[in-house]
Amino acid sequence: MPTIVPVILCGGSGTRLWPRSRATKPKPFLPLVGDSTLFSATVQRCPADGGFAPPVVVTGRKHLDHVKAQLGDAGDAAIIVEPAAKNTAAAIALAALRLPDDAVMLVCPSDHHIGNAQAFARAAHAAAALAEDGWLVSFGIEAKSPETGFGYLKRGEAIGDTGFRTAQFVEKPDLDRARSFIADGGYAWNGGIFAFRVSDFMRELETHRPDIAGAVRAAVDRGRAEGAEFYPDAEAFAAIEGESVDYAVMENTRRAAMVPADMDWSDIGNWHALHDARESDAQGNSVQGAAELVDCRNVLVDTDGPKVSVIGLEDVIVVVDGDDIMITTREGVQKVGKLHGAANQ
C-alpha cells in the first residue's frame, strides 16, 4: 500500500456556529465533540503507524498560531501559509506542488467530525489504492437521511472490490429530490474528502483550469520557506480566481471515482448538526455546561458560564458564550451566519 500524505485544509470562519465559533478562533480549533478539537482529531486520525506520512496543513496567517499549538505529536508536519483564501482548488494545488509527483494526497477538511476512525482508515487506504491506479477519488459518505445541505455523488460501475466510478456530481438538492436519492440507494453524500496522486491532480488542474495551476505554480516558485512553514508569493497568488476543487477538477475529469464510507461523519455545519453529533438523553436533549431542562425535547444547551434553565420547549438551541446569547429553532440554524455578530467577531 502507498504511504498516504494527509493534506489538511484549515480555512473558513465557521459563522454558522456563532457565538462559540468566531473569526478569531473558528470551529476547527474548538472542542465541539468530545475533548479534542476538530483539527486535532483530524490529525490524530492519520497516524504514522497507520500508513500515513506527516501531514501538510494549508492555512491562513490568522490561524497559524492555532495550528502550531494544536499539532501535538505531529511536530514534523509541514505548514503552508496561504496569502489569501482562494478556495479549495488552489489550496490543494499549493500542497501538491510541495510534494513529489508520485505522492498520494488525502485531502481532509479540518472541521469535520468522524466518529469511527477505523472505518475512515479503511476508506482512506481503499481510496489510496485507486489513486495509485490513476483515479481521482471522493469519499462517498453513506446517505442516511434526505439532507438538502450536501452535494451528492451518484455511484457508477464498480472498480474492483473497493470503489466505483462517479457517474454524476449532484448539487445540493431540494427535499423531494433528496428523498428520491435515499429511495434510489445509489447516491452518497459528497463529504469533501479526496485522494489522488500529485501528478494526476496537477495534470487535471492544468487541463481544466490552467489559470489556477499557473498562478499557484508561480506563487510556489517565488515563495519562501521558514523552517516547517512555507509562504507562497502573495502577488502571484492574488491573481487566482478562487474555485472549489469539485468545480475545477472533480466534475470535469474522466477519472472520477468514489469509495463508500460509513464512518459516523458530520460536517458540523450548523448547531443542528452539532446537536446530532453529540450524545443526547432519552428525550433528545444535549447539555454542555450548567443547565436545567424541564419537560423539554430535542433541546441543545451550550453555555460557558451562566446556568441556563429551559422549560417546556422543543427543537430549540440555546448558546451562551461570554456576553453573547444566541437562541434559535432548529429550522433557523442556517441563518445564524447572517447575524451581525457572526459576521464581525
Image (cartoon, helix red, strand yellow):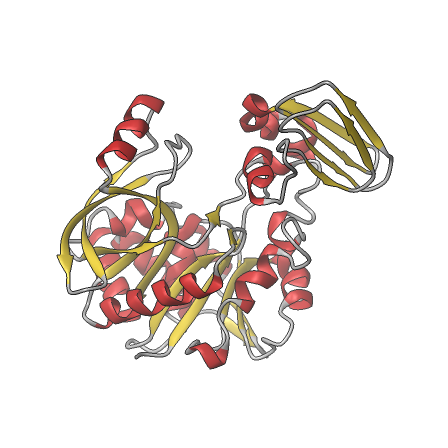
Report x, y in % for residue 202. Answer: 27, 64
> Residue 106 in the image: x percent, y percent?
38, 65
Classify the position of the C terminus by image quarter: top right
- Judge left or right: residue 203 versus residue 81: left
Can you see residue 46? yes
**Considering only vertical position in the picture, is 139 above or below 307?**
below
- Image quadrant occupied by the N terminus: bottom left
Q: Residue 344 vs residue 229: left or right?
A: right
Q: Residue at x 35, y 41 (%)?
A: 143
Q: Image height check: is 224 above or below 11? A: below
Image position, residue 305 (x, y; %): 85, 40
Horizontal side, residue 104 vs residue 274: left or right: left
Which residue is found at the position 45% from the left and 77% from the top? 50
Q: Is residue 219 visible?
A: no
Farthest front residue?
Answer: 282
Residue 49 rendering spot, x and y as whole percentages: 48, 81
